[in-house]
Image (tube, rainbow, N blue to C red):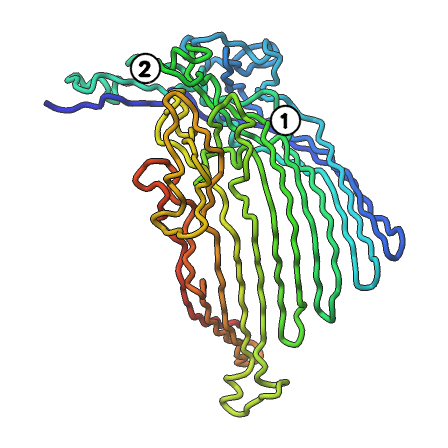
């Protein structure tokens, strides 16, 4: 007996967008030299970033109890909607009837961004700098494309038949005429648009220690609000029984919605030391301590987490360290011209002098601690339809203080399966990935051939110490064979040599 596919899917409709928008940005600023030791800088920006509008209004948004279809000012929707209107299982209204802008997102015109800065010379060696401002961001227009893939302009049709059927009912020819299976869903964007902005402030003190040596101590803080933040709608409470029948609206499936309630708090302190290049030596190094917190660190899934809530009814439960939080970071670079050749105490003559002089050594080092990540369950233990976001129960601190290996990076035994039909108590981003240690070294020499031609030789070593830096996160899906294990690393030590002719 020949086998035939038992399930298939296909897109019906246009599934694309012909979008229009306009931007208008105005600003004014002034510099005021109050005295020889004090200077002020202040300004104001005003921005209008219109929401993206489809030229023919072929957009649709899904809400918990209705679909909102973009229309013109008279409430007319595009004729392309008629073919699939009957498939919408709930009420639908036009944007005019809903009182919505035809972009299906509320316009935003309150975008004033003041900024102020101060530089104060306490004495010839010490300068204090203070700054604060509001900085607006533009959400990614690409996210809005989900509105062109909702009914009635587009439908991703899923068809399923018995696996042992002998009738080829799912051939390409007749899949479009087969009845769809499953409940209707989509993806939405919260109409109550909130402009993303960062309130930032900084304080720094710069002091000259000695000739060519400068030290700087600074603090930077930022509060981001109004960020695009994905969540799930129409999700039932944990419990037994068919998921679709327990949804708040059983006529619809669960669907993802982009909200504007994302936020971040960030604080950092930096100590910087610089030796300006002189006498053949330049040094630049900085150490930063920082802390960042948020309820989600990206609009989409990353190696570190799903960035969707475990329990959509408790967004506050997702408050945790950001998945890009590297608490300690040290970066330095140096350049040193070897004291050999003309102008130095050791200046051999002849061929040796021609080869020995003019060599420079440079190095760049980066050292940082690891970022946190979330442990998730491989199954829908709560029976809510949002399995990939669920977490296990945690019994103790899963981070090992010693004895870490690629096969056991953290204490996997600290996690257990929650009781059936419940969410786990493990928090978001509670386990730390590997940090990063790297030092690159280069040796260069330039040979002057004549007035117009030069030859440069370079010998470079990357990851000089051959330190193993593991890639991304270890296996973070609980109770799977790869749980807690690293399988890949970044580049080992590499060496390269090069010649470059410049003419």
Residue at (71, 31) in percent of width and height: 111
Residue at 59%, 81% (x, y): give it: 339
216 in relation to 340, above or below: above
Label at residue 181: 2
Where is residue 455 shown, x and y percent of the image? 50, 75
Residue 357 drawn at (x, y percent): 55, 83
Tell me residue 205's x, y (percent).
Answer: 75, 55
Question: Dot 1 corresponds to which residue?
Answer: 194
Q: CA distance from mark 2 to mark 1?
A: 36 Å
Whether residue 83 is visible to the viewer of this picture, yes or no, is no
Q: Are marks 2 and 1 in contact (CB under 8 Å)?
A: no
- Tell me: residue 241, above or below residue 322: above
Task: From the viewer's side, name the closer residue of 244 and 25.
Answer: 244
Say which residue appears at 86% left-offset and 52% top-offset.
33
As drawn, the label of residue 151 is none
User: Mark 1 Cα within 10 Å, few/some/many (few <14, many 20+)?
Assistant: many
Instruction: State the residue at coordinates (35%, 31%).
Output: 378
Q: Residue 53 falls in which quadrant of the image?
A: top right
Q: Is residue 240 above or below residue 136?
A: above
Quick one: 10 or 376, which is closer to the camera?
376
Q: Earlier in the sequence, mark 2 or mark 1?
A: 2
* Residue 423 in the figure: left or right of residue 139: left
Looking at the rendered image, the quarter that the N terminus falls into is top left
Task: Name the outermost residue toward the left.
Answer: 1
């Amino acid at each position: 007996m020949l086998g035939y596919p038992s399930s298939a899917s296909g897109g019906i409709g246009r599934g694309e967008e012909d979008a229009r928008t306009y931007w208008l940005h105005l600003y004014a600023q002034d510099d005021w030299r109050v005295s020889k030791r004090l200077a002020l800088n202040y300004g104001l920006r005003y921005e209008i970033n219109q929401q993206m509008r489809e030229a023919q209004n072929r957009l649709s948004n899904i809400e918990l109890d209705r679909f909102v279809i973009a229309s013109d000012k008279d409430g007319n929707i595009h004729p392309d909607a008629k073919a699939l209107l009957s498939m919408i299982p709930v009420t639908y209204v036009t944007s005019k009837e809903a009182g919505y802008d035809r972009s299906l997102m509320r316009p935003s015109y309150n975008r004033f961004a003041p900024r102020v800065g101060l530089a104060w010379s306490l004495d010839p060696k010490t300068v204090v700098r203070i700054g604060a401002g509001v900085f607006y961001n533009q959400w990614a227009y690409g996210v809005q494309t989900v509105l062109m893939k909702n009914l009635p302009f587009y439908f991703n049709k899923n068809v399923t038949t018995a696996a042992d059927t002998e009738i080829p009912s799912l051939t390409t020819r007749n899949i479009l005429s087969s009845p769809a299976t499953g409940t209707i869903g989509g993806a939405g964007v919260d109409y109550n648009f909130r402009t993303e902005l960062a309130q930032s402030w900084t304080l720094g003190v710069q002091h000259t220690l000695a000739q060519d040596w400068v030290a700087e101590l600074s603090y930077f803080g930022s509060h981001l609000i109004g960020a695009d933040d994905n969540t799930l709608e129409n999700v039932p409470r944990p419990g037994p029984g068919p998921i679709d029948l327990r949804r708040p609206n059983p006529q619809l499936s669960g669907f993802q919605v982009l909200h504007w309630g994302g936020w971040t708090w960030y604080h950092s302190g930096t100590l910087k030391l610089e030796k300006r290049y002189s006498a053949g030596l330049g040094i630049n190094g900085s150490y930063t301590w920082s802390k960042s917190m948020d309820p989600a660190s990206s609009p989409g899934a990353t190696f570190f987490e799903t960035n969707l809530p475990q329990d959509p009814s408790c967004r506050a439960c997702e408050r945790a360290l950001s998945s890009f939080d590297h608490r300690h970071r040290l970066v330095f670079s140096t350049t040193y011209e070897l004291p050999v050749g003309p102008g130095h105490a050791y200046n051999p003559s002849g061929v040796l002098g021609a080869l020995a002089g003019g060599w420079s050594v440079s190095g760049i080092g980066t050292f940082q601690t690891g970022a946190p990540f979330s442990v998730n369950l491989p199954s829908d233990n709560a029976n809510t339809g949002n399995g990939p976001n669920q977490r296990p129960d945690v019994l103790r601190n899963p981070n090992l203080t010693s004895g870490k290996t690629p096969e056991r990076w953290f204490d996997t035994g600290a996690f257990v399966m929650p009781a059936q039909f419940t969410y786990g108590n493990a928090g978001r981003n509670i386990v730390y990935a590997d940090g990063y240690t790297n030092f690159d070294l280069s040796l260069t020499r330039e040979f002057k051939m004549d007035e117009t031609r030069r030859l440069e030789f370079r010998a470079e070593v990357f990851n000089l110490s051959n330190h193993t830096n593991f890639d991304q996160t270890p296996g973070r899906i609980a109770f799977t064979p790869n749980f807690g294990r690293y399988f890949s690393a970044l580049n080992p030590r590499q060496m390269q040599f090069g010649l470059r002719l410049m003419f």
